[in-house]
Image (spheres, helix red, strand yellow):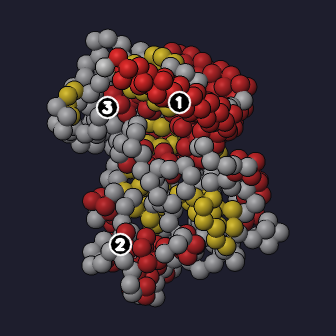
Amino acid sequence: MRSHHGGRRPTLLRLVCAVAVFSVFVFVIQSSFFAGNVRKLSVNPEDIQILSDFQTSVQQCVANRGLGLTAHVIDHCNLILKFPEGTNSTWYNAQFKIFEPLEYKYNVCEAVLLWEQYRNMTTVLTREYLDSRPDGWLDYAAQRIAQLGSDKCYNRTLCEEHLNLLLPANPPFHPRQFRKCAVVGNSGDLLKTEFGEEIDSHDAVFRDNEAPVNEKYAKYVGLKRDFRLVVRGAARNMIKILNGSDDEVLIIKSVTHRDFNAMIKSIPNPVYLFQGIVLRRGAKGTGMKSIELALSMCDIVDIYGFTVDPGYTEWTRYFSTPRKGHNPLQGRAYYQLLECLGVIRIHSPMRSKRKQDWTDVPSREMIRRAHASALRLKRSEQQTGWSRDSLEQFGNCKVWGYSDNMKGQVSGSPDMSDVRKNSNYKKWEVMPFRSLRKEARDHYTQMEGVSLYKMDGNRLDDLVCVRHPSVTEA
């Protein structure tokens, strides 16, 4: 027995040595691979510093403007917005059986990329988008037509009949078209402050759904009416909504419908379909979509009636009995974040009592630098080969199209009523380039005549980009 065990010791020793050598070999390979990834994922320390400084500025802005909200920085991209202890959380989530939380985590880098991109976006569905997008007419067009009876446009002629009435050839509205815009929500807090004249002083006013505009509420919400974003249910009442306002532009949030089309043919107002994104985080509702729409046309977006002051823990309407709606605390936190990212300026009863100079909001230059750093950081984290070109303004263009002229054909159909045919519903679509404000023309030149559209969902990386004629041709 001793001789037997003695004969196995060398074999066992050789096996242990072999395992040790193999382990060292694997370790060397893994270390080399990891080091390669570190080199690949390395970021410029200057970008981290820029984003960290930006976070500090956002944190200070929330402290100054948040009316009790505080921002707690996690790292150069992430922070948590917290409500003070004792905040009354009354909105109940029946699905998860919990009350609305008192803190929310946000990725500021992603938020800056998303909302700064919206300043360059086209947010109205156009023919050039459907023509440029792969299977745009076959697949996507069908999603924008209710009661089509098919999930695809196998009969393109039929789909065109549904969409032509509200489908401009090219973008009817342009980035930087207006300097200062007001987005008016429907909150009952509008009745606490007389913002009417201030709202009407804006270059354009955006409203939601069935919110009334009349002398009864004029001192609270104003009388100016330029754009109105409506959900499908409200669109059924579009004639009543638009009564007395022939120039107000109606933009339907979701889908068109044959009943809608019948109404559109009889009214003089421009009517279009909204081409936005899906925000899975942050505030919800038509009001948020109206902000997206306004930001794609305006330099400055002022919001009113969005239930953002402490003490408001449920949505109310200024023109109807109170009703429970979206989660108000999360909405208030997200709107505050957007204000401190320079996206919007909040007006509310509590804020009206103090000087509004917005000097504590990060400057446009600081936001621009943070945006550039966040973009470089995002590219470095993708772990794929990327070049300098991918950091340029068209780096997210996954699909390219070309529009042969700026005017193109206008929306409409042969069987429209004389009221519509003889109105100026198409004025936005045939607006001469030279009539746009200088900032809009400069932006067109800077973007090399390219219109940007979202393709799907809320991904930053999927854009349909359509090139228009040069400025000289325009």
Q: Is residue 402 visible?
A: yes
Instruction: Name the amino acid type tagged 1.
Output: Ala
* Viewer-side label of 1, 2: 1
Give the x, y percent position of residue 54: 63, 24
Residue wearing tag 1: 18
Instruction: Name the amino acid type tagged 2.
Output: Ile
Name the one closer to the observer, 70 or 96.
96
In the image, what residue occupies the spot 63% across and 78% down?
408
Q: Is residue 427 visible?
A: no
Number of residues whose C-alpha sits closer than 10 Å to that of mark 3, classed few (under 14), some (14–19) or many (20 or more):
many
**Is 344 placed left or right of 7 in the picture?**
right
In the image, what residue occupies the spot 53% across and 16% down?
64
In the image, what residue occupies the spot 64% across and 71% down?
401
Alpha carbon of mark 3 to alpha carbon of mark 2: how far? 32 Å
Give the x, y percent position of residue 6: 41, 19
Work out which quarter of the rendered image holds the N terminus and state it: top left
Q: Quadrant of residue 157?
A: bottom left
Number of residues whose C-alpha sits closer than 10 Å to that of mark 2, classed few (under 14), some (14–19) or many (20 or more):
many
**Is 464 placed left or right of 347 in the picture?**
right
Q: Earlier in the sequence, mark 3 or mark 1?
A: 1
Instruction: Name the amino acid type tagged 3.
Output: Pro
Residue wearing tag 3: 328
Name the one closer to the observer, 372 or 313.
372
Q: SS class of the residue under badge 2?
A: loop
Q: Which mark is residue 145?
A: 2
Q: Which mark is residue 371?
A: none
